[in-house]
Image (cartoon, grey):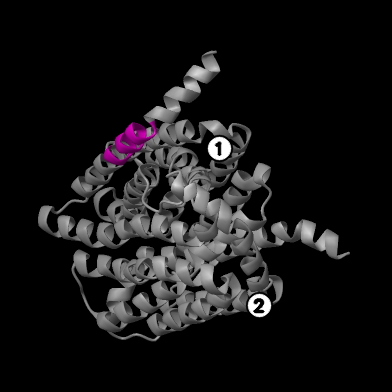
Amino acid sequence: MSKTENKNYWKTIVFTFCLGWAVIWIYRSMLSPVYTEIQQTIGLQTNAAMGLISSCYFFGYTALQIPSGFLVDKFGQKRVLIPGFLIFAAGAFSVATAHSLTAIYVGSVLAGMGCGTYYGAAFSLTTEHVPAEKKGIGTAIVNSGSALGMILGMTGSSFLVKQLNLPWQVMVCVSGAIILLLVVWVAFAIKDNMAEKQAMKQKQSEDTKKTEKAGGKGKLFSLKLISCYLLYFTTCYAYYLIVTWLPSFLESERGISGGLVGVVVSMISVTAVPGALYFAHLSDKKRDKKASIITGLEIAAFVLVAVSMLVPNAALLSLVLLLYGFLGKMAVDPVLISHVSDNADPKNVATTLGVFNFFGMSSSVIAPALTGQIMDVTGSGELGFYIGAALLLVGTVFFLICNAGSLLKRSETAAN
């Protein structure tokens, strides 16, 4: 019986962390469609000030990436994750009861710090337990929770607040309750694995020393990993720019209003799940071609982000966003995470993933506030979106250069 449980435990892990991403993304995406209603509580604000709500959340989230990765490697995923999500719930309820912009900022930082314990815990645990031949697809299923959460957060807040005319605080309280339910589930579903981690560290110690001497996986800042960090920074910049400001952009500059805003933006998530599953499965089948898959997806994302500003109506924009969902950040995430894990020191996978996500999430601190400032100065959000596309191109080119040697070697091997 215990053997069967151990054999299927990875499925419990994948299901649990898929739920976790859904809960996180409900919170992340539910505020931007109701910025107007929030200002009815706290008073009229500039675009930059409203964008800072998202930046404050991501500041807290980003600040915890490296420390939480270190704590996960030291104390185990469960012991870090449960206190973290209790802090997340406290932040959500603080936002719901806020009556000033400053109070919302403080609650957002607190919620971000709580969420900051999640990334290293989720993906280090999947790296440890998901079979190698299913690692890509397992990561994609975990990530698909973010698509589900984005749909529920955007459409839910648009429907409850704009259609049913409920207070915006209702959706925030609902998300807080869901967070607490997830804490209860994690407490029962996830095992405390500290004894297992200590045994694994001891076993891998000698291999890690040899790897470090050879100049391979032991380096946290090898050139390949640095290229992944930069690429994730630019990928997240473009993505969080879209998630944070596209609803407001559509309403003010494209004439799309009401509940339709959340529906149009959630088009990204409709095709994100099949896209992530397809490319993750492809990377599992062609493990030696992950860098090529990543490069192709990033080039496609650059084109779609740039083109999104040129489309004349909601129908064409929905089509572009559907394609971006299939080929963009959510599709490349599982392949890129798997690529990083392959090049990480097995003893410090959570720390490496924490550094990786720190660079990615740093952009999410910058993008919302900077784009809001650009909108205040120029009166339009178009320049902000073009900046996001340009950064994505820079990151892709750098990644391609740093991985050119291995890509060329694989091409020659295939030719022979």
Q: Which residue is mark 2?
A: 187
The answer to which of marks 2 and 1 sits earlier in the sequence is 2
Q: Residue at x 39, y 68 (%)?
A: 61
Which residue sits furthest top? 416
Q: Secondary structure at mark 1?
A: helix
In the picture shown, does residue 36 fall above or below 328?
below
Assess whether residue 17 is covered by the magenta stretch. no
Residue 3 horizontal side relative to residue 56, left or right: right
Say whether residue 351 is visible: yes
Residue 40 location, quadrant: bottom left
Q: Residues within 10 Å of mark 1 (few under 14, many from 20)?
A: many
Which residue sits furthest right? 1
Q: Residue at x 28, y 48 (%)?
A: 254
Q: Residue at x 20, y 58 (%)?
A: 370
Q: Which residues are magenta?
A: 394-403
In the picture shown, does residue 182 fall above or below 224?
below
Q: Residue at x 44, y 79 (%)?
A: 92
Q: Residues within 10 Å of mark 2 (few under 14, many from 20)?
A: some
Residue 288, percent from left and from top: 54, 32
Q: Which residue is mark 1?
A: 279
Residue 354 location, quadrant: bottom left
Which residue sits furthest left? 377
Say whether residue 257 is visible: no
Q: CA distance from mark 2 to mark 1?
A: 32 Å
